[in-house]
């Protein structure tokens, strides 16, 4: 999945408490007249900003800590400030409605949960590596065009994006999380993709045909099934299944919680996915008790989650690397299966 902002939760909490105590002492003893930047060397201050960006932002705005110390700031409540004061800023996070006209060209990681407007402010952010925007749709205001020159961009998380990905086709994009996307992936982009999250997608998997280096797929709304198609006086049945996954030789993780696979050999395409290690299909029911037979070709499987499956799991016994199974409707000799897996210190949950 996509890389998160560099925040260590435990360290951030501890450091935040220490900074809050420092701010309290300043208020009580000096009215804010202490020369704050003398407390630590500048490089230490910069590292502190990585662990406590919200508190660091307050130090800069309220207690005149030099702006250029900040590598990371986080904004959670509205206030007037000039982001261009932070000339060395590399990481920026905001949960308020914020539309800057320009940003630091040194930015590498950006998270804006309530960004409103176009992306023109990012046009000169040539070092940008990751961008996360919860509400950006990209279907107006020039879409992703301002990011065309951001050749270092590796990760985009835009759940509501429905625009055009073509401006990013020349770069090095590796991870995409765009849950509402229904468009097409540029051919040049397909070759580079490593991780793809389309959790509201329920179309045809031909969308990812050609993504030969794809290793992680999350499509939790994909159901698949057999569709009838009428042409002239002839009715034909067409399977919308996992067949396009056959070419994904490097596929490592597949998560499709709504995929039911209730037709014969629905998992057969996975037999060719010999690098598969994690399979999560919460609602998979299959068609017959031996629906898991194709998984015998996935000898590297380590994690299997099939909570609705009512068949048997005997095909999994031959998998030497299997470590975790989660199923609520296993039919068969559960104790025997557990015994065979216990030898490999596996975990079963039924």
Image: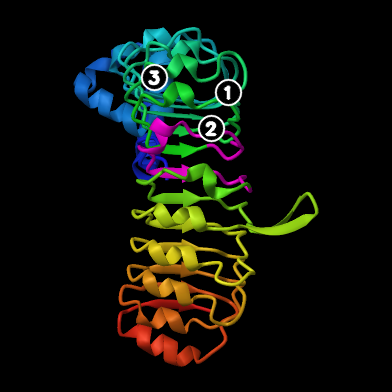
Q: Residue at x 59, y 36 (%)?
A: 181
From this view, report whether residue 142 is shown above or below residue 294: above
Residue 33 x %, y %: 35, 11
Q: Which one is in front, 252 or 245?
A: 245
- Asked if the residue under mark 1 is in contact with the one under mark 2, i.e. CB atoms within 8 Å, the reply is yes
Q: Which one is in front, 6 or 172?
A: 172
- Which quadrant is the N terminus positioned in? top left
Q: Residue at x 34, y 34 (%)?
A: 51
Which label is found at residue 60?
none
Q: Is residue 155 visible?
A: no
Which label is found at residue 158?
2
Residue designated by label 1: 138
Please provide the residue range marked out in magenta: 178-202
Residue designated by label 3: 59
Q: Nearer the viewer, mark 1 or mark 3?
A: 1
Determine the CA span between mark 3 and mark 2.
31 Å
Residue 169 x %, y %: 41, 26
Indicate left or right for 119 with 57 as reference.
right
Residue 282 x %, y %: 58, 65
Neighbor class of circle 1 (other Cα within 10 Å; few <14, some 14-19, many 20+) is: many
Q: Which one is in front, 300 or 346?
A: 300
Q: How is the image coloured?
A: rainbow
- Which quadrant is the C terminus positioned in? bottom right
Indicate left or right for 107 with 283 as reference.
left
């Amino acid at each position: 999945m996509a890389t998160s902002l560099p925040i260590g939760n435990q360290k951030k909490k501890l450091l935040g408490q220490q900074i809050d105590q420092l701010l309290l002492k300043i208020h009580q003893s000096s009215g804010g007249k202490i020369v704050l930047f003398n407390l630590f060397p500048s490089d230490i201050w910069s590292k502190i900003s990585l662990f406590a960006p919200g508190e660091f932002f307050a130090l800069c705005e309220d207690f005149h800590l030099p702006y250029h110390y900040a590598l990371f700031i986080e904004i959670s409540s509205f206030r007037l400030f000039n982001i261009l004061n932070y000339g060395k800023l590399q990481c920026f996070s905001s949960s308020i409605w914020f539309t800057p006209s320009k940003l630091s060209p040194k930015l590498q990681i950006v998270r804006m949960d309530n960004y409103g407007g176009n992306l023109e402010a990012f046009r000169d952010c040539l070092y940008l590596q990751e961008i996360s925007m919860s509400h950006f749709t990209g279907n107006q205001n020039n879409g992703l065009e301002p990011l065309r020159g951001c050749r270092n961009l590796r990760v985009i998380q835009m759940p509501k994006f429905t625009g055009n990905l073509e401006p990013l086709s020349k770069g090095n994009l590796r991870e995409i999380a765009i849950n509402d996307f229904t468009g097409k992936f540029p051919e040049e982009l397909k070759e580079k993709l490593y991780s793809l999250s389309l959790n509201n997608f329920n179309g045809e998997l031909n969308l990812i045909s050609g993504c030969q280096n794809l290793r992680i797929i999350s499509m939790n709304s994909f159901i698949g099934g057999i569709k009838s198609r009428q042409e002239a006086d002839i009715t034909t049945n067409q399977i919308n299944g996992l067949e396009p996954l056959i070419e994904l030789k490097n596929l490592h993780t597949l998560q499709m919680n709504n995929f039911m696979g209730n037709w014969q050999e629905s998992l057969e395409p996975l037999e060719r996915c010999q690098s598969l290690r994690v399979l999560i299909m919460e609602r998979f029911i299959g068609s017959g008790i031996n629906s898991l037979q194709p998984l015998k070709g996935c000898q590297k499987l380590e994690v299997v989650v099939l909570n609705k499956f009512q068949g048997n799991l005997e095909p999994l016994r031959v998998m030497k690397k299997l470590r975790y199974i989660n199923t609520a409707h296993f039919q068969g000799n559960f104790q025997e299966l557990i015994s065979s897996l216990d030898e490999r210190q596996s975990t079963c949950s039924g």
